[in-house]
Amino acid sequence: MQYNKCKLVWTPIDFVERRSNLSYEEFVREYASVGKPVIITDAMKNWKASTKWTVDFFKSEYGSVKDLMIDYKPENNTWNQTELTMSIADYIDDITSDASDKLLYLSDFNIWNYPKLLEDYEDPIYFNNWYKKLPVELLNKYLGNICNVLIGRKDSTIGLHNDHRRDTAWVAVISGRKQVVLLSPDQEKYLYNGQVDCFNPDLQKFPLYANAKPVECLLNQGEMLYIPSDWWHHVINLENTISLAINTLNEWDYEVVCQKILQRAPIKGHLFPLIVKFPFLGKALLAVGLV
């Protein structure tokens, strides 16, 4: 397969549709196959996480876990990111304190490393995920976290970005609300590699952004946003918020993901399709230290 010739499919939008009672066939026809975002309002009804996942729960059950926190805030009309490692308990104390002046965001709490948490949600019927075929050790080592709990205080963000693997993603809000700006892949030339604050753009510093066509939407508690491959997104928490973000690999993004991996690392890029097709190969390569 010639991955360097594959074409990204996407559809321009003026607003993000909200859908309920959406069948898998409708999702494929109207959204996945044409690269179009959608908010699904009723895909989380039976999740234990909807009532179980609170800051008190994470502090009690995972308080001793240390993870990377991001403090991402605007300075001099651009975004500045600092990182620090702290325990979940200390982090939750910080974000629930009115005295803190930080905008800390826990955005990489990989729940595939904590199997009990996997029991608290159900994969929506819309998102077949071939990543699940692969060894978790291989995913963590070469592709990064793809199944994360996000916990952030009001006004926190990780800034404007697209997912570096070019895979699709979905974000489900357990509690709180998020404001989201989406930009289709063809808008990248106006985005200054993600330095623009989409919620307060400085057009003197980033004049090309005036040509961009951002689409804004509100993501409420109990709602889920589907983000197709290569769509840029800037998300800000309007309240203290807990959410689940999962990247997926399937027939709709497989070729562009393979292309991206091949461009960044030719050896891994040639191995990756084989490992997806034959997952036991990934385990064998890990066992002998070849990946």
Image (spheres, rainbow, N blue to C red):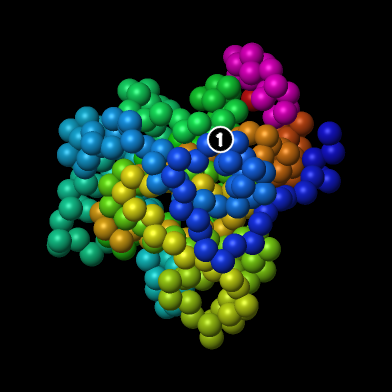
In this view, the residue farthest toward the front is: 21
* Residue 81 x/y as whole percent: 42, 61
Task: Give whichever of 209, 97 is nearer the camera.
Answer: 209
Q: Is residue 278 above or below residue 141?
A: above
* Residue 148 x/y as whole percent: 41, 39
Please rate how many residues cluster around mark 1, counting C-alpha atoms within 10 Å: few if below 14, some from 14 to 19, many from 20: some
SS for tag 1? helix
Magenta-drawn stretch, dominant element (helix, strand or loop): helix
Q: How many marks?
A: 1
User: Is residue 265 something one can see in this rendering?
Assistant: no
Task: Give whichever of 184, 42 is nearer the camera.
Answer: 42
In this view, the residue farthest toward the bottom is: 204
Q: Quadrant location of residue 45?
A: top left
Q: Which residues are magenta?
A: 271-289
Q: Is residue 226 above or below residue 274?
A: below
- The reply to whether the magenta stretch includes residue 113 is no
> On the image, numbered disc 1 is attached to which residue?
24
User: Is residue 124 something one can see in this rendering?
Assistant: yes
Tell me which residue sits at (59%, 62%) in the image. 13
Q: Is residue 76 above or below residue 12?
A: below
In the image, taking residue 221 as reference, residue 11 lies left or right, namely right
Tell me which residue sits at (51%, 51%) in the image. 38
Task: Give whichever of 275, 90 is nearer the camera.
Answer: 275
* Residue 36 x/y as whole percent: 60, 52
Q: Quadrant location of residue 86?
A: top left
Task: Give whichever of 213, 161 is nearer the camera.
Answer: 213
Q: Quadrant location of residue 240?
A: bottom left
Tell me which residue sits at (53%, 44%) in the image. 169
Quadrant in the picture for the N terminus: top right
Q: Amino acid at mark 1?
A: Tyr
Tell me which residue sits at (37%, 66%) in the image. 73
